[in-house]
Amino acid sequence: MKIGTIDFGERPLFLAPMEDVTDIGFRHLCKRFGAAMVYTEFVSAEALVRSVKSTVSKLTISDEERPVGIQIYGRDVPQMVEAARIVEEARPDIIDLNFGCPVKKVASKGAGAGMLRNIPLLLDITREVVKAVKTPVTVKTRLGWDSEHLIINELAEQLQDCGIQALTIHGRTRSQMYTGEADWTLIGEVKRNPRIQIPIIGNGDIRSLDEADAAFDRYGVDAVMIGRATFGQPWIFSRKSLTIDEKIDILREQLLINIQRITEMKGTKDDTKKRRSNEYRGILHTRRHLAASPVFKGIPDFRQTRIAMLRAESADELLTILEQCRERIKQL
């Protein structure tokens, strides 16, 4: 499978772009364990154009994680074009347009999946962004706004005509949010459409490599994208079996990587207060992964431990909780 000049090989697995999840530390781990493509957290075109620091910082990528994509969202043609040009300066391998985010604060304003209610504007944005940049442009979207408007077959052809080089389809409508089961049948129909020449990437409810393999076999997609199932298990992309000890060591490493990365970006200048601030930022990037990790499934009365993870404010505190969990698992 190829996007532009990038050859991903056969049956590649991609890490989905997710806000507050796919930070640089997590991306590095997913890449290490076999993700063929990783994406940054999605970024607001409006915030990029306004040079909002917290948004601009999300454009930080490294050569070690390539190929890497940066995803943008917005509802205004000039802003999306300017944002794409700003993104291109960060040298991603792919620029992805988000027409699928269902959350209210995005979709209700007409961006993300909200674009599925204004197809002419969606196509205008896509066409103009493709013309504005040299980097390959791709799109991620859903089946339609709701079950009465399953437009993905026609939309896929229209997006291809706009010049995109790959299309990711999440097998739900916007109205479904993340409820119910992802419907891959329409994704398969798009892939089988003889007019479609670009790669089709399937997304939705892939929780294991076995499920990814089944999606490849059943629907013929060119790649599979994994999202929420990666929380707390960046090793999901690996076919190697890991021990519980190895998995907990990886979670420890994720925490330390995030603290280190933020310290490198922010600097400390031997400022104790700033070091603590950087440490806390690293913890914020990590603790939701720890609390969601399936590694701890089966620990009796884990709810209180999960709450402690989500409330932890220091690395030592989190590392101690992890070691306690390690010991409790050994006693099971």
Image (cartoon, rainbow, N blue to C red):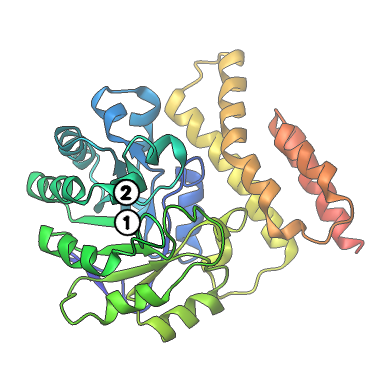
Left or right of residue 183, residue 200 in this image: left
Residue 19 makes an appearance in the image: yes
Left or right of residue 328, residue 280 in this image: left
Residue 142: horizontal and vertical position, in percent? 36, 59
Q: Name the amino acid, label 1.
A: Lys
Which of marks 1 and 2 precedes in the sequence?
2
- 10 Å crowding of disc 1: few (<14), some (14-19), many (20+): many
Q: Nearer the viewer, residue 199 or 148?
A: 148
- Compute the Cα span from label 2 to label 1: 5 Å
| Picture layout, residue 56 above or below residue 135 | above
Q: Which residue is mark 2?
A: 98
Residue 21: horizontal and vertical position, in percent? 51, 45
- 10 Å crowding of disc 2: few (<14), some (14-19), many (20+): many
Picture disc at residue 241:
none
Give the SS element for disc 2: strand
Give the SS element for disc 1: strand
Image quadrant containing the C terminus:
bottom right
Q: Which residue is mark 1?
A: 140
Q: Quadrant of residue 50?
A: top left
Residue at screen point 16% across, 49% down: 120
Residue 60 makes an appearance in the image: no
Q: Nearer the viewer, residue 122 or 223?
A: 122
Task: Check contact, mark 2 vs mark 1: CB within 8 A.
Answer: yes
Left or right of residue 251, residue 81 in this image: left
